Amino acid sequence: MSAHCQLTGAQPRFGKTVSHSHRRSSRRFDPNIQRRRYWLPSEGRHIRLTLSAKGIKTVDVIGIEAAVARIRAAGGRV
């Protein structure tokens, strides 16, 4: 499973870990990605989306139909 949100587009970011002595080493900031299953009433079926925590909250606010419309408008496959 790739660390990529289908709704918000959140992806891993990269940065540095800085130790007490200020030595720097590379690190990766991963988004909180979850796989969620939603019922899509217009198509009469369940869909499984890969969403970040913020994406899940967005679906709760705008609804699954609007979220799927946004994903499809951005060229995503549902």
Image (cartoon, grey):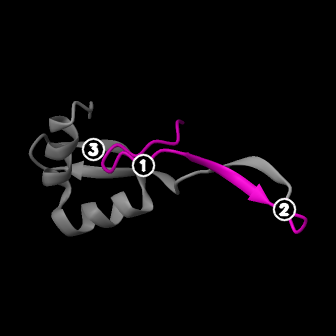
User: Going 13% across and 53% down the picture, which residue do you hit?
Assistant: 66
Please state if 39 lies on the left or on the right of 16 as rendered: left
Disc 1 to disc 2, how far (Cα)? 29 Å
User: Amino acid type of disc 2?
Assistant: His
Please state if 37 lies on the left or on the right of 1 as rendered: left
Residue 49: x and y in percent read 36, 44
- Decide whether the magenta segment is chiefly helix, strand or loop: loop
User: Going 84% across and 62% down the picture, which residue do you hit?
Assistant: 22
Q: Which residue is mark 2?
A: 22
Disc 3 to disc 2, how far (Cα)? 50 Å
User: Amino acid type of disc 1?
Assistant: Ala
Residue 60: x and y in percent read 26, 67
As helix, strand or loop, the secondary structure at mark 3 comes to: strand
Lower position in the chain sequence, tag 1 or tag 2:
1
Q: Which residue is mark 1?
A: 10
As helix, strand or loop, the secondary structure at mark 2 comes to: loop
Residue 73: x and y in percent read 15, 37
Closer to the observer: label 1 or label 2?
Answer: 2
What is the quadrant of the N terminus in the image?
top right
Question: Local crowd at mark 3 within 10 Å, few (<14), some, or many (≥20)?
Answer: few
Q: Which residue is mark 3?
A: 46
User: Amino acid type of disc 3?
Assistant: His
Spot the residue most to the front: 22
Residue 3 in magenta? yes
Q: Which of the 4 image quadrants contains residue 53?
A: bottom left
Closer to the observer: label 3 or label 2?
Answer: 2
Question: Local crowd at mark 1 within 10 Å, few (<14), some, or many (≥20)?
Answer: some
Q: Magenta segment, which residues?
A: 1-22
